[in-house]
Each structure stands twice: as C-alpha cells, then as structure tokens.
C-alpha cells in the first residue's frame, strides 16, 4: 500500500473524530431532561385523553374519528420509544428499559427488545443489502438484484411496488406485531417472558375496550382504521430517511457510511414535531444518542463539515423525499415489468 493511500485512509478515519469533537464542545450530546419530561407528559396526556374521548363517544360511527386520532398518538408514542431506545432520554440502561417497554410493549403493542436489536443493526450498517434488516428483501424490494425470480403475489407486488407502497403501509402496524410475536417465540430476546406479558396486557385491554364499548362490526372497523392510520403515519415517518439513497459496500468509514445513506427533510418546526426529529436523519445517524431538540442545532455544524470534507449531504422537502423513494421503488421493479412484457409478447 502506497504512503499516499495510507495518508488518505487516516484522514478519512479521523474525519468523524474531528466532527465529534465539535459537537461535544457545542454541548449537543448533553441530555435534555426538561424537554423529554414535557414530551412524555404530552404524549401520556394525549393517550389518556384519546381513550377518554373513545369512551365518551361510545358506540357511534363518530368513533372512527377517534380511531384516526389514536393512530396519530400511537405513532408519537412509538417515536418516543425510539428516542428512549437510543438512550436520548435516560443515561442508564434500567430506566431506559422500563420506559421503553411501557411505551413500546404496553402502549403500542410491539416488542421493545426485538425492535431495539433490529434497529441497532440498521444503524450499524444503514442500507447495506446484507446487513441492514430494513432493506432485506421481504414484501418490498429495494435492490434490483433482489427482484429477480419473484413470482406470484410477490412478483406482482415487486412489479407495482411504487403504486402499492402507501396501501401496504396500512399493514405496517400488523407486521410489527407479527414480527414481535415471532421474535418472542424464539429464544434470543432478553426478558422475553416480561415482553410477552406486557404485549399480552396491551392486546387484552385493547380488545376488551373495543368489544365492551362498540358493536362487533364497529369494533372491527375501528381496529382497521386505527391500525391503518398508525401504520401509514409510522411508515411515512421512516420512509424519507434512507429509501432511494445509495447502498454502501460496507468498507466506508463511519462518517461516509452514515451520511451518504441518509437523507434530511426540510420543513421547520411542524415537520420536526410530525417526524419526531427524524427529519434530521444525517445528524441522528452520526449521533444516535443526541437528544431530538439538539439535532436542529447540530445540522449547520454537520452540513458545513461535510462540505469541507467533500461528503455528499442530501437534503430535500418532505414531498420530494417521497417522490425519490417511490421513483427508486419503480426503477427497482423495472426489470420484472420488462420481463413480464417479454413473456406476454412471446
């Protein structure tokens, strides 16, 4: 290896260390207990208030408006669980685990331990075809080579996945629960008895509330609307972050691996609140433990640093981020559509 190559590698390796020092000196990794005390109180109040309205409205079709409201509240609770899992709220493991399981298992109804392990693997290798579970070929395909050989319903979805993206998001909340149950069924998740018990508590209380207050038909419709809104909101929160961005080889240094695969979303305080701060995805991936309100302050530092280091820094509007993700899905499915056309033409 030449001396010039060695110097370039050392320089690249030191890029994040220098940025990290700037962020530490600016105090942006320090906890924000007041912010999270207010945010947790607001989410708790909304959750309690939403269910209070549900019982007040009673067995009426107006309860579907409550289902929409609770879908939004559940998503905000899930975003809060995300911050807790990253140790943004509490410094130590025990209070993080307790609060995380309350927010995820009890409130939302998914396994905190399973999701945290999965999300950690995503952060370690974002958009890596083999190592990131969020781009692993399942219902949707994010890499063209993964599309080949798909037949039947999977092949149909892959060919038309751009158009089916938002309808499929209505099933996301159900998929989270199914994946949680599968994970807890297998050995490996820590405290899986506790996790399973807390999830069971969620399902029993949720089902009892719907069946006691609503007729069976209204209960079913409420469930479908509530879970659909929850899934779409949550999916639209995470979709702009990496979808349609480059897929790394895995040998990039930490700074480039995290920045190049991520996309920021502009929009101001309203978008900040709606997306739970995940619109600052680049800063979040570089500094996962950084409290959400500090991400906005870190952005100009990170962006200027990336410009000096020659690292591409992607930033776009919310609508454009969805366009880019859908365009990528459409392009990935193109070979299957072309193959289908050739088969029909023969």
Image: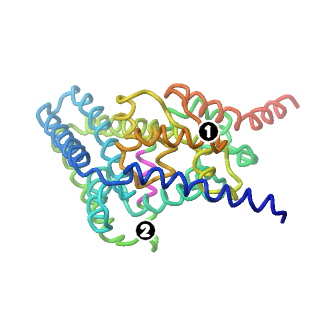
| Secondary structure predominantly adopted by residues drawn in magenta | helix
Which of the marked residues, 2 or 1, is nearer the chain's N terminus? 2
Residue 191's spot in the image, x, y percent? 34, 72
Near mark 2 (Cα within 10 A), the count class, few <14, some 14-19 or many ≥20, is few
* Residue named by callout 1: 307
Q: Which quadrant would the N terminus be assigned to in this image?
A: bottom right
The figure's colour scheme reads: rainbow
Q: Secondary structure at mark 2?
A: helix
Q: Which residues are magenta?
A: 173-180
Instruction: State yes or no: residue 221 in magenta.
Output: no
Instruction: State yes or no: residue 177 in magenta.
Output: yes
Near mark 1 (Cα within 10 A), the count class, few <14, some 14-19 or many ≥20, is few
* Left or right relative to 180: residue 335: right
Q: Residue furthest bottom?
A: 187
Which tag is nearer the camera, tag 2 or tag 1?
1
Residue at 36%, 70% in the rendered image:
192
* CA distance for labels 2 and 1: 47 Å
Residue at 45%, 64% in the rendered image:
183
* Residue named by callout 2: 185
Q: In which image quadrant can residue 13 be found?
A: bottom right
Is residue 154 among the parts visible in the rendering? no
Q: Secondary structure at mark 1?
A: helix
Is residue 38 among the parts visible in the rendering? yes
Residue at 32%, 53% in the rendered image:
109
Q: Is 20 rendered above or below residue 313?
A: below
Q: Which quadrant would the C terminus be assigned to in this image?
A: top right
Q: Is 189 rendered above or below residue 128?
A: below
Residue 291's spot in the image, x, y percent? 36, 49
Residue 104's spot in the image, x, y percent? 32, 54
Q: Which mark is residue 80?
A: none
Residue at 41%, 43% in the rendered image:
295
């Amino acid at each position: 290896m030449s001396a010039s190559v060695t110097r370039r590698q050392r320089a690249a390796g030191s890029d994040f260390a220098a940025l990290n020092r700037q962020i530490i000196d600016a105090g942006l990794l320090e906890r924000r207990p007041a912010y999270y005390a207010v945010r947790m109180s607001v989410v708790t109040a909304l959750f309690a208030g939403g269910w209070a309205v549900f019982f007040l409205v009673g067995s009426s079709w107006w309860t579907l408006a409550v289902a929409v409201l609770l879908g939004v509240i559940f998503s905000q609770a899930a975003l809060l669980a995300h911050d807790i899992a990253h140790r943004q709220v509490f410094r130590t493991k025990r209070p993080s685990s307790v609060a995380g399981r309350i927010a995820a298992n009890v409130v939302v109804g998914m396994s905190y331990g399973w999701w945290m392990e999965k999300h950690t693997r995503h952060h370690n290798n974002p958009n890596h075809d083999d190592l990131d579970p969020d781009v692993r070929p399942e219902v949707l395909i994010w890499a063209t080579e993964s599309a080949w050989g798909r037949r039947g319903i999977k092949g149909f979805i892959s060919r038309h996945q751009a158009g089916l993206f938002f309808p499929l998001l209505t099933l996301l909340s159900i998929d989270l629960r199914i994946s949680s149950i599968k994970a807890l069924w297998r050995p490996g998740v820590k405290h899986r008895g506790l996790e399973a018990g807390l999830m069971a508590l969620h399902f029993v209380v949720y089902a009892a509330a719907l069946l006691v207050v609503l007729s069976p038909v209204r209960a079913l419709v409420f469930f479908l609307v509530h879970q659909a809104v929850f899934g779409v909101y949550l999916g639209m929160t995470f979709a702009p972050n990496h979808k349609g961005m480059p897929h790394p080889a895995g040998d990039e240094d930490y700074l480039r691996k995290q920045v190049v695969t991520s996309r920021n979303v502009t929009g101001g305080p309203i978008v900040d609140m709606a997306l739970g701060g995940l619109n600052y995805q680049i800063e979040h991936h570089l500094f996962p433990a950084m409290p959400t309100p500090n991400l906005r302050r870190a952005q100009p530092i990170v962006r200027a640093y990336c410009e000096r280091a020659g690292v591409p820094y992607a930033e776009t509007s919310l609508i454009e981020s969805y366009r880019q993700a859908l365009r990528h899905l459409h392009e990935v499915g193109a070979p299957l559509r072309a193959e289908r056309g050739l088969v029909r033409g023969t």
